[in-house]
Amino acid sequence: MTYEDMQGKTYANTTYDVIVVGARCTGAPLAMLLARAGHRVLVLDRAVFPSDTLSTHWVLAPGVRLLREWGLLDAVVASGCPPVDRVWLDAEGLVLSGAPETVTYAPRRQVLDALLVDAARAAGAEVREGVAVRDLLWSEGRVAGVAGRDARGRQVRFEARMVVGADGRNSTVARCADAEPTVDLGALAATAYGYWADVPVCGAEIRIREGLGLSMWPTHDGLTTVAVTLPRSVYGRGGARETFAAALARVPEVRDRLTAGRAVGAVHGAQNLRNYFRRAWGPGWALAGDAGHHKDPIGARGISDAFTDAAGLFRALDDVLTSRLPEERALERFRARRDTGRAAAFAFVCRQAELGPLDDPFLARLREAAGDSLATRELLGVFTGERPLEEYLSAARDSGTVSAG
Ligand SMILES: Cc1cc2nc3c(=O)[nH]c(=O)nc-3n(C[C@H](O)[C@H](O)[C@H](O)COP(=O)(O)OP(=O)(O)OC[C@H]3O[C@@H](n4cnc5c(N)ncnc54)[C@H](O)[C@@H]3O)c2cc1C
C-alpha cells in the first residue's frame, strides 16, 4: 500500500520505529535526533509550515544551548533574529539590569518551527503536514500506531513500535492513552501579547507588580514583543485587546513608548493555561513537551523544556530501539528526570503566575544584588534559565538571605 503527501510525492506505507505527533519545539527536534541516529521516523502535524502559534517565543539559555548543540543556532541567527543580550528587571520599582552569561533569542514561531521541521526532514525523518491524528491504534494492550485524516479528508493509518505525543497541551495522544495528570494546579493566570514597531528595547525588559507581569523583548523584523500576565479574573472582563490596554494603564512609561510606536497585527490572548504534569508513558507510547507537562508562560520556559524533553526522550527511545534498555526502564528514567528536574522551576513559575505580593526574602535578595554586578548576574540568570533555581536558592540559603520555605 502507498500514500501520497500534499506535494503529490508517493511513499510506501511501512511500519516505523517511531511516530511523532506534533512537529514544533518538541516533535521536530525529537524526530531530527532519532533520524540522525538512523531510526525510521514519521512526524505528523495538522499544521502546514511555516505556521505561527500562540507564543511570545523567548528561548531561554538551556534552549539556546541545545540549538547550538544540534547545529541549528546559526540558522536562527541568520534568520535575522536579534540577540537578547541584556536583561532589565523591575520588581515593584526595584531595578536590576545586566548582561546574562548566555545570549538568548526570541525568534518568531513561524521562523523557528519551520527551521526545526526542515532540520528533521534534512536528517531523514518523514514529515507529513496537514494530517490530524484522531485516534491511537492498539494491539495486545500496546499502542501500535495512529489513525487520522490527511489534508484532503482521507482516512490514514500508520503503524509504529512507539508513538510519541508531542502535540501540545490539548494532546490527542494523552487523551487517547488516558494519560491522567499526576499534578494539576489548574490555570493561574492569563496572558495577552502583541507586536510593536518603532519601540526599541535594550534586551529583555521584565516588570513584576502585584497582579501584573509585563515583558518586552526584540524579535524578527525590528518588532518588539510585548506581553502582559494578569489574574484570570481580570482577563475575563474583556477581550485580549481591552485586557492589554487596562494592564498598560498601570505602567504609563511603557504605555507612552507603545503610543509613540506602531502596533503591528492583533493582540493575542490565552487564558486556559493549566499547570500540570501528566503520566509520561505507557506501553508503546510516551508524551513530551507541553503534552506531558505545562506551566504558565510567565516563566518563558516552555520552549527550553520542550527541547530538553526532545533530547531526553531521544536518549530513552534510542536505548529502547537499540535494545540497550527495556522500554519500561528507559521511559521511566525519562519521566523521573523530567519530574525531578522541573519540580523547583514549576513551583517558582506557579508562584510567579499567582501574581501575589513579592515576598520579603525575594525582595531582600533583589536589594542585596542591586549594585553588585556578580550577584545581579546570578539573580538575572534565574530568569534567563541560566542558573537552575535549586542551585541559586541553595546558594542564597547558605548566605542566609532566602528562607528554606
Ligand atoms: C501565550 C503564550 C506565550 C508563550 N510564551 C513563551 C515564551 O516566551 N517562551 C517559551 O519558552 N515558551 C512560551 N510559551 C510556551 C511554548 O509556546 C510551548 O511550551 C511550546 O510551544 C511547546 O512546544 P510543543 O512542541 O510541546 O507543543 P506545541 O507548540 O503546542 O506544538 C504542538 C503541535 O502539535 C500539533 N498537533 C496537535 N494536535 C494534533 C493532532 N491531533 N494531530 C496532528 N497534529 C497535532 C499542533 O498543530 C502543533 O503544531 C508560551 C505559550 C503561550 C500560550
Image (tube, grey):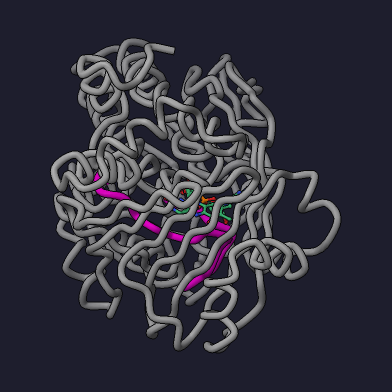
Residue 376 position (above or below residue 336): below
Magenta stretch: includes residue 263: no
Q: Is 59 left, or right, of 381 in this rendering? A: right
Q: Residue furthest right?
A: 237
- The region drawn magenta spans 43-62
Residue 264 in picture, x, y percent from top left? 57, 84
Residue 22 appears in the figure:
no
* In the foreground, 322 or 210: 210
Report the predominant secondary structure element of the magenta stretch. Answer: loop
Of 22 and 131, nearer the camera is 22
- Residue 135 location, quadrant: top right
In the image, residue 326 sits, relative to residue 262, either above or below, namely above
* Residue 150 % position (x, y): 62, 61
Q: Is residue 201 above or below residue 147?
A: below
- Horizontal side of residue 152 vs 399, given as left or right: right
At 65% from the left and 42% from the top, the residue drawn is 273
Residue displayed at 45% across by 47% down? 91
Viewer-side residue, 272 vs 43:
272
Q: What residue is rendered at 54% in x and 20% in y?
A: 279
Q: Nearer the viewer, residue 384 or 57?
A: 384
Q: Quadrant of residue 249?
A: bottom right
| Residue 350 on image: x %, y % | 55, 31
User: Which residue is found at the position 52% from the left and 46% from the top?
Assistant: 298
Q: Quadrant of the C terminus?
A: top left
Report the label total.
0
Decide if residue 193 is in sight here: yes
Asked if residue 50 is among those painted magenta in the image, a careful observer would answer yes
* Residue 286 image point, x, y percent: 46, 28
Left or right: 120 as drawn, with respect to 405: left
